[in-house]
Image (spheres, coloured by chain):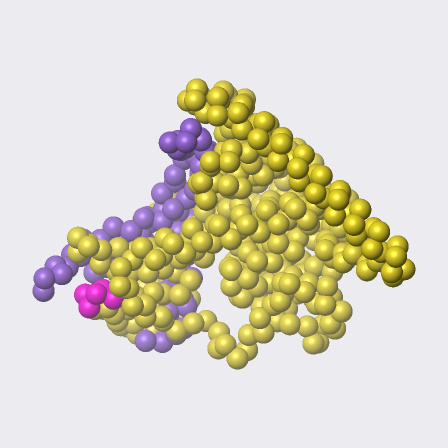
Amino acid sequence: MESTFIIAFKEVLREQFIEQNTVEIDGLGQFEVKHREQHQKKFESGKVVLMPPADVVEFKSNIKHSHED
Amino acid sequence: MWLNLNQISNIPMKIDKQKLVELLVEKTSMEEEEVRSQLDQLIERIIDAAKRGKALEIREFGLFYFDEEGELKFDPSDELSTEISFKYAGMKPVELKPERDTSFPEPEEDDDDLEDFDFLSDIASDDSNVYPGTEEEKGVFADQEKPAEKKKSTTLKSPKFQAKKRSGSIIWVFAAIVAVAALVLAYLYFIGSLATTTQQPSPAVTQVEPDELTSMNEGESQPSASESNEEQQQSAETANQSQESEIPEAEIEIESSVEPPEEIIPSDPAEPARETEVSNENQPLYGLRGSVMEEANSGYSIVLHSFTEEENARSTSESLTQQGYRSIVSSRTVADRTMWRVSVGQFETLQDAQQATRNLPEPYNTQNFIHRIQIN
């Protein structure tokens, strides 16, 4: 596999993610960028932390593999 | 055509395999058939590696593997996560403290991930005028500041027994402080008498802060603050690393990297002052200071300012250049708005850039984010 292809693959997907586009690759899965709102997180110690918002990439795939194979 | 439409409307689109192939053809100048074949090979390799119980890592992109339930998973790399979430990069969790916690730290607190949040919340409550920005650049950090101020005023409940324990511990803390102060005074007196008897000049105190650190900010940065910042970043890095280590028995196959290693001269963030002394011809490829190296533009840079007006960005960049920093101006369109970013340094890896933030003066050492260099 050519390194130029791998580099281009990374760049193209990164650009699409930044544009908030969903990328669906047959035979692999779907990449989607989701926004996670800021939220409060409570700890048993009584500490409460405000977690900042973030955009995160989520990957879903229909491909399954049985470990018993 | 679809890409142009997307840029105009800024509506998220769905890219299928055919569109992806078209984009890859455009990017690589390879034949469509070849791109299609390469893509199929890549998919095959990911699946094969995963089936063999291994994880396949595409460097600076992410890791593919099958989880315990046999589902194909993808963990984005730190680099990718940072770039995707660039609008919020640099924003840290903020502790919303109960009122009574403001007098002294809780000795029994053992949440490692949160131990530096006092420092962070202090920064969040500060006015952003501390650095030489303008009103418009507050937009970048505005999201970060407003919730912190708002939430800080809220009173949080905690168990009563903690209050009792705290009042008891105040006495002990006070007693300990008095004892330590007495010891320090005795030690100083002893040292003083020793110096006068030997008639030797006392050694000069080493200046921790390099001169250039104060040049960006009128107020002097405090070593203790920068130290706590180091701890912050280390804990953040540790957290990131631990996330990766959750993958069981993952033997990582690493795909080919971008540049051959022999061309890379690693930056030395511990000695930023020396870089300024090196002439442009001999300066390292990567680093915080010196001149911008075109060859290093595939790396990362530390964003310090973001403006809506290009002119403001250019003048700020000019000022940073005069102070010896490698300063880069780039633009990004975020939600239909073009933001002009001013960043400093060129770094081969995200980690190098993170490390170099420690060499920046306050408030830049905490109020920054890292992006991949994109020259327009």
In front: B321, or B168?
B168
Left/right placement of residue A59 relative to residue A15 reads left
Quadrant assignment, res B291? bottom right
**Location of residue B362 in the rendering, given as x and y in whole percent from the top left corner:** 67, 46
In front: A44, or B18?
A44
Q: Which residue appears at 45% of the width and 25% of the height?
A: B162
B140 up-or-down from B32: above or below: above
Would you say residue B52 sits in the magenta stretch? Answer: yes
Q: Which residues are magenta?
A: B50-54
Q: Which residue appears at 36% of the width and 76% of the height?
A: A2
Left/right placement of residue B130 relative to residue B371 reads right
Q: Which residue appears at 41% of the width and 56% of the height?
A: B241
Q: Which residue appears at 54% of the width and 23% of the height?
A: B167
Q: Quadrant of the N terminus of chain B?
A: bottom left
* Chain coloured yellow in this rendering: B
In front: B335, or B8?
B335
**Location of residue B168 in the rendering, given as x and y in whole percent from the top left corner:** 53, 25
Left/right placement of residue A20 relative to residue B374 reads left
Left/right placement of residue B41 relative to residue B123 reads left
A21 up-or-down from B270: above or below: above
Q: Quadrant of the C terminus of chain B?
A: bottom right
B116 up-or-down from B16: above or below: above
* Chain coloured purple in this rendering: A
**In the rendered image, is residue A57 in sight?**
yes
Would you say residue B263 sits in the magenta stretch? Answer: no
